Structure formats: structure tokens, C-alpha cells
Image (cartoon, rainbow, N blue to C red):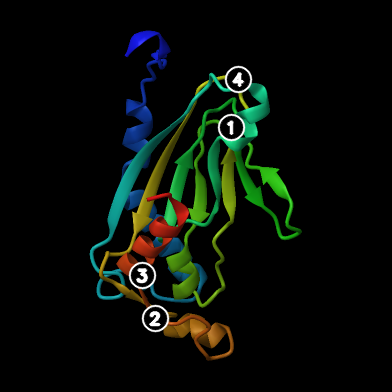
Amino acid sequence: MGSDFKAIPLIDISPLVEKIDDPNLSRKIMRGIALALGGAIDAFEGETAGDPFWVLRLIGYPVDIPEEQRTDTGCGAHTDYGLLTLVNQDDEICALEVQNRSGEWIYATPIPGTFVCNIGDMLKVWSNGIYQPTLHRVVNNSPRYRVSVAFFYESNFDAAIEPVQFCREKTGGAAKYEKVVYGEHLVQKVQTNFVV
């Protein structure tokens, strides 16, 4: 390890994990979305989605970066691959940015006790474009170590996702997106978003 080793502050995330690491929270959000779109409460469950899977990711952003390089460290602009992402941010560090409809990058200012809920690419397909994924990025401009906890709620890896009938009816009748197998989409996005 030598003299380059930097101590990372210990953070007790157990209360947060108990809140965010719950597929039922995401399932309830998806049920609300189904109802809001005019579908049955379970429209995005069962045969439509298969058994959903989820990933909890703890992401740390380093602090000992020269100030002129801080905006280059983080996570580049992207949309999330699946259905929903719930993100908990440090209460005092603005780093998550979203692109608004005018193309401007604005901060998703942390609100203590809340999560950011990102729409993913598969929900765009299911809703036939009614719901759009938010283009977002993380810009590490803080002099403090930043921790983000992200809970990714996804359809089954093998699920074939296509616009559902009740959303096609709301958008003119035709499917705007072709059928996509979630796992294939995930692999393609990871291969293009990360250096392999």
C-alpha cells in the first residue's frame, strides 16, 4: 500500500440500505406508474417482466483530486439501462446533474431523507415513450469524499421488452420502439459505456 494509501472515512450505511435495498419499494413505484398509464396495477409484473432482479451499488468518488480535474472525475452522461434507479446522495454534496429539456445541465440538489428516482431505458420502451429516461452524469466537484448508493430495479435478464398495448393506444396505436431483450441491451450498454 505504501504512502499512496488514503484512508476512506467509515460511513454507517445500514439504515440507508434497509430503506433502499427493498425490491418492494421499487415494485410499488412500478405499480403506481402502471396505474398512472391506465394499466392494471400488475401490468409490469408476471409474464411481462419475468422475475425482476436488482443490484445495489455503493459508489465512492475520491477527494484528493486537484481542483482543475474535479469536473473530469465522476460518471459521464448516460441513461440507466433498466426500469428504475433509486439513488441516495450525500446530503451536503451536489454532484448529480440532469439534463433538462433545454439541454442544460442542472444539479439534482440532495433533499435529506429522500431518494432520486431515475427512469430507465426499459420503462421508455414499455411506455412507448410516455416516460423518458433522464440523461444524467456525476461531476465530482467537492473537496470531500462523496458516497452514492444506487439501487437498480430491472426486469428479468431474459425478458423481451416491447411497448405494452395500453401505452400504444395512448400514443397513436403504433409501437415506437422495437422489442428488446433486457439482458442484450444491458450488455451492449455496458460494453459501450465502459472501457473493456
Dividing the picture into quadrants, the one containing residue 159 is bottom left
Given this view, does label 2 or label 1 mark the residue nearer the observer?
A: 1
Give the residue at x 51% y 34%: 89
Query: Residue visible at 51% across and 38% down?
Result: 114
Q: Quadrant of the rendered structure where residue 17 is?
A: top left
Judge the density around disc 2: few (<14), some (14-19), many (≥20) Cα neighbours within 10 Å: some
| Residue highlighted by disc 4 | 143
First-in-chain label (2 vs 3)? 3
Q: Which residue is mark 1?
A: 140
Q: Which residue is mark 2?
A: 179
For badge 4, the amino acid type reads: Pro
Tell me which residue sits at (55%, 74%) in the image. Answer: 129
Between discs 4 and 3, the one toward the N terminus: 3
**Label 4 to label 1, Cα distance in Å?**
9 Å
Q: Report the number of numbered marks.
A: 4
For marks 4 and 3, give the one nearer the viewer: 4
In percent of width and height, residue 146 lies at 51, 27
Q: Sequence-wise, which precedes: disc 2 or disc 4?
A: 4
Q: Tag 2's secondary structure?
A: loop
Rounded to the nearest angstrom, the CA distance separating label 1 from label 3 is 35 Å
Amino acid type, mark 3 = Phe
User: What's under tag 2, amino acid-wise?
Assistant: Lys
Q: Residues within 10 Å of mark 4 (few under 14, many from 20)?
A: some
Q: Residues within 10 Å of mark 1 (few under 14, many from 20)?
A: many
Q: Earlier in the sequence, mark 1 or mark 3?
A: 3
Judged left or right of residue 133, residue 55 is left
Secondary structure under badge 4?
loop
- For the N terminus, give its image quadrant: top left
Q: Residue 67, relative to residue 42: is it above or below?
A: above
Q: Residue furthest top?
A: 3
The type of residue carrying mark 1 is Asn
Separation (CA) of disc 2 from disc 1: 36 Å
